[in-house]
Amino acid sequence: MKRTFLIGLSGLGYFIVSLFLFMPFRMKPIENYNLFALPFFAVVFLFLLYKACTAKKDSRGYLFGYFAGILMWQLFGETASLTVPSGLILQFSDMNIKVLGGYFYVLAGWGLLYMLWKLKMLNSRAAYVFVIFLGIWSFEVYMDNYSSRVPLFMMGIVANIIMVVFLIASIVVLVMAKRSASIERKTILGGVFYLTLNIVLMSSGQWKKPQDFYLKYEVPALQQELIDTQRELDHIRQLQLQMIYLP
């Protein structure tokens, strides 16, 4: 159980460190910061994925896979869609996979992953990387949308229900780890414990009221989306006018 517990905490420890890596995007914007951040996360992710698939011991492979899954989320779920205030490339991708409609792709991802695993078409360590990635994506979809979707008077109630459910899940994971004699199983459960513990911590405090980060930093992002949408609409109208005068 100790190994499982420490692996879960190590993920939270890395998350705290990574907050400083993402500060230059919105909290203290730096020009061209994404030109540094995206290659950095990409190289580290590919290194961890390689080590996860080639490590001789399964326990080490799953441990590398655990952190590869976390980096995979930060690369594809965060860095690619965040903008910098100015520079050569303001944003690598305008696809935000955390919008509410992202639930469809999360469910599809879980379904496809299960099928590939059952059909033995995917290396178990690589599958574990996607388990961590999809697990983070699953609660990120809620985390990025609850402030605008859940009624204010219901936030505390919903958060308490989520907290109780995942507190029980966390305890079950630790009990399973204690009863297991397999280091590999304890390692895998460490990643699951990281996911459930994250949700317990957020639902015990952050999710009881609207996100402070959402209220402070999401408005400029939404305003930019409106400007971009208006530009696209103007372009379509110009095309419609030009089409009228075509022979």
Image: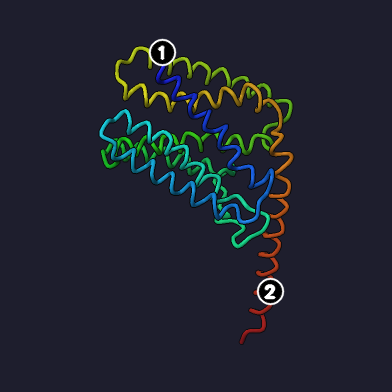
Q: From the top left corner, tell me how far across and down residue 158 is, in percent.
A: 63, 24
Name the kind of residue labelled 2 in the image: Gln
Q: From the top left corner, tell me how far across and down residue 7 is, in percent.
A: 44, 25
Query: Which quadrant holds residue 160?
Result: top right
Instruction: Judge by depth and name the residue closer to the eye, 87 or 220.
Output: 87
Task: Find disc 2 in the rendering and name its residue.
Answer: 238
Residue 8 vertical position relative to residue 129 in the rendered view, above or below: above
Q: Secondary structure at mark 1?
A: helix
Task: Find disc 1 in the rendering and name its residue.
Answer: 175
The residue at the point 57 percent across, 50 percent down is 81
Q: Is residue 2 left or right of residue 30?
A: left
Name the kind of residue labelled 1 in the image: Val
| Mark 1 to mark 2 CA distance (whole Å) | 64 Å
Which one is earlier in the sequence, the residue at label 1 or at label 2? 1
Q: Is residue 42 left or right of residue 19?
A: left
Query: Which quadrant holds residue 209?
Result: top right
Q: Is residue 5 left or right of residue 86?
A: left
The residue at the point 66 percent across, 23 percent down is 205
Using a 10 Å C-alpha cutoff, classify the residue at mark 1 as few (fewer than 14 neighbours), some (14 to 19) or many (20 or more): few
Q: Secondary structure at mark 2?
A: helix
The label nearer to you, 1 versus 2, is 1
